[in-house]
Image: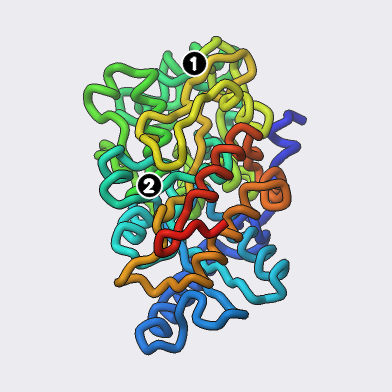
Amino acid sequence: MSEQEKSKASMSEEKIVMPHKRGVPWFAVVAIVVAVVIIIAAAFAVGLLSSGQDKDSVTLTGAGATFPMPLILKWADAYYNKTDNKVMVNYGGGGSGAGITQIKERHVDFAASDAPLSAEDSSTYGLVHIPETLGAVVVAYNEPSIQNLRLDGPTMARIFMKNITTWNDPAIAALNTGIDLPSDEITTIVRSDSSGTTFVFSGYLAITSSEFAGLYGQGKSVNWPDAIGASGNPGVTQTVKTTAHSIGYIELAYALANDVPFAQLRNRDGNFVNASLETISAAASNVTLPAGDGDWSQVNILNSPGADVYPIASFTYILIYKELYNDQSKMNETAAEALIDFLWWAVHQEGQSYAPGLYYAELPTSVTAINEATLNSITYQGQELR
């Protein structure tokens, strides 16, 4: 049995599992999240609930990337218990683009995004980046006759550009010698929402294919040709599982938790590697990062050098305001302190210890040090909170 197969979680064909809570259908999770968000919004509107209104009870709201959503939800559960049910963290997902919009409009206390902000947005809105974990985007597929698919960047770019349309195309065959490839037509599954996962995946394709870079480029939304769109990592996972002969891109945690096969990828050094905690961590071993309030727009660890590096690895970020007080914000100082305490806990050993079990890599100590400096600089009415 391959390493990839040993890592996968067993489940039924009919359910998409959120990796932090096994056995819950993805559509049920989405429905619950939506209902919770609506209830919270209504409570805020009528004044029944506000962040930190009670010194002993605080509710923090967040939205954004589904890439790290399993880990954030796990953190929320654990931290609620750790604080004796006094700090509740509600995270609604929705995609990186939606999260960025909501934090800019101050509809949430924090956002998560796999795509860093532009330098202009960071400066204009006064938002800081807090790397929360490391993950990988994998190329999931539904072609039962292929057990161990191998791909490289240029070939994947041609598949998603529809220049390669069948599984037995010579370019795929050249990477999978000795395998009898079927002649079935390939169906591509992509994100329909503004997505950090799309930002990461399209960024890799743009690095490895000049043709893709010229025609499409990197973005949270890409005008994919002749593809089926689905919302969020759960939606793409579900669609790949139920669409014969398909291929799509999803975060590693969703593939492993839902028993979806994914390809080995040829890395920059020419080696075929599986996505794993070790190969993801290797991608960030030599990265140099800015200060939390600096320019993160050029930060990426895609296609990093190294014999054992997985080529589509990425940081994912929490976005918060450097100054948490605002006349229009419902956040009071108690909630501001609770937010900083929660994030401090999440990026340190206790919070990070939940990452490997959900197939995310823990932050390197050098990144934790940057996060410490960032969190120590956060203020409320000009006063540092730590």
| 315 lies left or right of 169 | right
N-terminal label among 1 and 2: 1
Mark 1 nearby-residue class (10 Å; few <14, some 14–19, many ≥20): some
Q: Secondary structure at mark 1?
A: helix
Tag 2: residue type? Ser
Q: Position of residue 200 (x, y in %)?
A: 42, 35
Q: Residue at x 58, y 80 (%)?
A: 55
Q: Is residue 16 visible?
A: no
Eye-nearest disc, 1 or 2: 2
Q: Position of residue 320 (x, y in %)?
A: 43, 54
Which numbered tag is attached to residue 208?
A: none
**Residue 309 lies in what quarter of the image?**
top right
Farthest residue to the front: give it: 383
According to the image, label 2 marks what residue? 195
Q: Residue at x 62, y 80 (%)?
A: 56
Q: Residue at x 34, y 64 (%)?
A: 106
Mark 2 nearby-residue class (10 Å; few <14, some 14–19, many ≥20): many
User: Eyeballing the image, is 55 above or below 127?
Assistant: below
Q: Is residue 317 visible?
A: yes
Farthest residue to the left: give it: 215
Q: Residue at x 63, y 42 (%)?
A: 360
User: Eyeballing the image, is 74 above or below 201?
Assistant: below
Where the N terminus falls, by quadrant?
A: top right
Which numbered tag is attached to residue 173?
A: 1
| 213 lies left or right of 361 | left
Q: Position of residue 187 (x, y in %)?
A: 39, 38
